């Protein structure tokens, strides 16, 4: 009689995860996840039929198709940085042609006007890039807020209740912290630096050398601090919780095998099969999350890299032609873009590494 | 482009020789030759630069980039060159006072031209802080 009661209780316990998986990952839930993505990322996911439910799309994924997609992004983002670069080089050439006049007072006034023009030329598109970076960080946070509970449920349904619960809470917290720190602390710091750089290009009394280094160090330090602490805690917790989950599943198998008469061994094996199939689903959902993150952040990263290339070329040209004012301005803007690149890379790495840690460490 | 360059060089040499010859007889005519030579050189130089600049503007307009600020920079450099040319010519004629007045007028023109740019710099800097 006792064995029958234990069997019924165990049936209920293991029925919960399976029903949770069936209840959670319906077609409509997958659509909800897709809806949480920004417009461009959603279109890309739909075009390539990438969904959270099945991993069939992975068969169509090839190196050439990924390179082709990156090339398409490059083509769509290349116009603005290169057009600005050509204008900037034109301004640099104009400024360098002033040396023909010599050190007359009108040449100094013109140099001032030309530097102001270069500041406006470069600042306006960079301002748009910073704004879109803020928006992308916020949309990434919205997506992760929708994604993490679904992923946590799949992990719990996989029989890893402790890992799923702790990972879910930790990742949700990290998503909020990264978004808050990025958009309310680091990006405002960088914007302050950019405004000082632009102002100092037309007002030489402002010196920004010390300020630029401090802001760069502070921004990276803040983001690295949060990422390292979060990933450290997540890794340790996942390893410990995975062991606890593994132990509880093994105990459950042993109890089923020992307590259920005749069909005990078969039921224990069935449990292993169910866990393995849910493991596949967990990996599929995690990879969907990773790809969604990459699709959200990659266009911005490519745009930032293109900006850095163009700014460096302009800096080299202005350096060669000894146009120091424009060279300094371009270098300071490049520094701000490099910080932005760092923040975006850290945010992306945080999500991608977190999901990878949970998938790879918590295998039973 | 190269042909224009040789033309300019030729005009420079002819102008210099003419000035040297005329200076011994009449300094007024020599001054007139200096001014005319300067205007011709400026005309050829602008003609040479105008073509590639127009091409650049066309390309940039096709890509949807606003070129108004670049035009301001171009105008400022043009004003600086003309101001410098007039100021130098006035100095050559011994009119230092007129030369400094021309420079003052040039600086004022460049400053007026760059006021919208400075306003834009200010707005962008404030935009970053906001």
Image: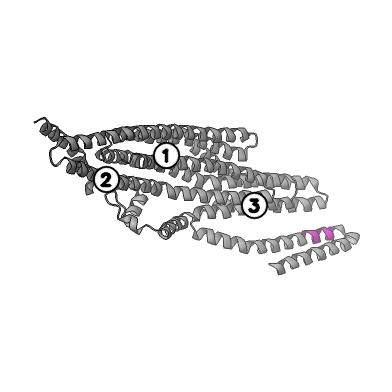
- Mark carried by residue A350: 1
State the residue position of label 2: A276
Q: Nearer the viewer, residue B123 or A337?
A: A337
Q: Residue furthest left?
A: A1
Q: Residue at x 50, y 41 (%)?
A: A342
Q: Marks 3 and 1, Cα distance to the nearest angstrom?
A: 37 Å
Image quadrant assignment for residue A248? top left
Secondary structure type for disc 3: helix
- Mark carried by residue A317: 3
Residue A356 is at least partly visible in this image: yes
Q: Marks 1 and 2, Cα distance to the nearest angstrom?
A: 27 Å
Q: Nearer the viewer, residue A94 or A230?
A: A230
> Mark 1 or mark 2: which comes first in sequence?
2
Secondary structure type for disc 1: helix
Label 1 CA crowd tier, 10 Å (few <14, some 14–19, many 20+): many
Label 2 CA crowd tier, 10 Å (few <14, some 14–19, many 20+): some
Q: Residue at x 86, y 58 (%)?
A: B27
Residue A112 is at least partly visible in this image: no
């Amino acid at each position: 009689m006792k064995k029958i009661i234990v069997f019924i209780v165990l049936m209920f316990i293991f029925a919960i995860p399976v029903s949770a998986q069936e209840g959670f990952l319906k077609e409509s839930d997958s659509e909800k996840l897709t809806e949480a993505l920004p417009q461009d990322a959603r279109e890309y996911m739909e075009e390539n039929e990438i969904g959270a439910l099945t991993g069939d799309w992975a068969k169509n994924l090839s190196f050439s198709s990924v390179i082709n997609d990156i090339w398409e992004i490059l083509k769509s983002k290349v116009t603005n940085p290169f057009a600005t670069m050509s204008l900037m080089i034109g301004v640099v050439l104009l400024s360098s042609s002033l040396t023909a006049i010599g050190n007359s007072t009108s040449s100094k006034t013109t140099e001032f006007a030309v530097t102001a023009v270069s500041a406006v030329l470069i600042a306006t598109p960079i301002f748009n890039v910073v704004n879109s970076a803020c928006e992308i960080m916020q949309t990434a946070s919205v997506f992760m807020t929708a994604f993490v509970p679904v992923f946590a449920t799949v992990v719990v349904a996989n029989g890893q209740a402790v890992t799923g619960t702790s990972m879910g809470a930790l990742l949700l917290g990290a998503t909020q912290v990264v978004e808050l720190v990025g958009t309310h602390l680091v990006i405002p710091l960088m914007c302050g630096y950019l405004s000082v750089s632009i102002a100092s290009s037309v007002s030489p009394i402002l010196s920004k050398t010390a300020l630029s280094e401090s802001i760069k160090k502070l921004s990276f330090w803040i983001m690295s601090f949060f990422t390292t602490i979060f990933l450290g805690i997540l890794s340790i917790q996942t390893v410990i919780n995975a062991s606890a989950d593994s132990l509880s599943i093994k105990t459950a198998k042993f109890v089923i095998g020992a307590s259920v008469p005749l069909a005990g061994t078969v039921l224990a094996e069935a449990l292993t099969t169910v866990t393995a199939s849910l493991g596949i689903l967990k990996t599929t959902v995690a990879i969907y999350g990773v790809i969604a993150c990459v699709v959200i952040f990659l266009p911005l990263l490519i745009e930032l890299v293109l900006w850095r290339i163009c700014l460096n070329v302009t800096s080299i040209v202005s350096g060669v032609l000894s146009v120091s004012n424009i060279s300094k301005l371009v270098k300071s803007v490049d520094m701000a873009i490099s910080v932005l690149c760092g923040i975006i890379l850290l945010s992306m790495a945080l999500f991608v590494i977190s999901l990878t840690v949970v998938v790879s460490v918590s295998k039973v | 482009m190269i042909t224009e360059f040789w033309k300019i060089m030729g005009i420079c040499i002819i102008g210099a020789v003419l000035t040297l010859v005329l200076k011994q007889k009449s300094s007024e005519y020599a001054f007139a030759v200096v001014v005319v030579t300067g205007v011709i050189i400026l005309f050829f130089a602008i003609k040479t630069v105008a073509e590639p600049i127009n091409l650049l503007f066309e390309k940039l307009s096709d890509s949807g980039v606003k070129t108004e600020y670049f035009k301001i920079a171009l105008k400022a450099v043009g004003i600086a060159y003309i101001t410098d040319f007039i100021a130098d010519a006035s100095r050559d004629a011994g009119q230092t006072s007129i030369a400094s007045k021309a420079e003052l007028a040039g600086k004022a023109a460049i400053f007026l031209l760059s006021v919208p740019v400075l306003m834009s710099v200010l707005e962008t800097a404030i935009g970053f802080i906001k």
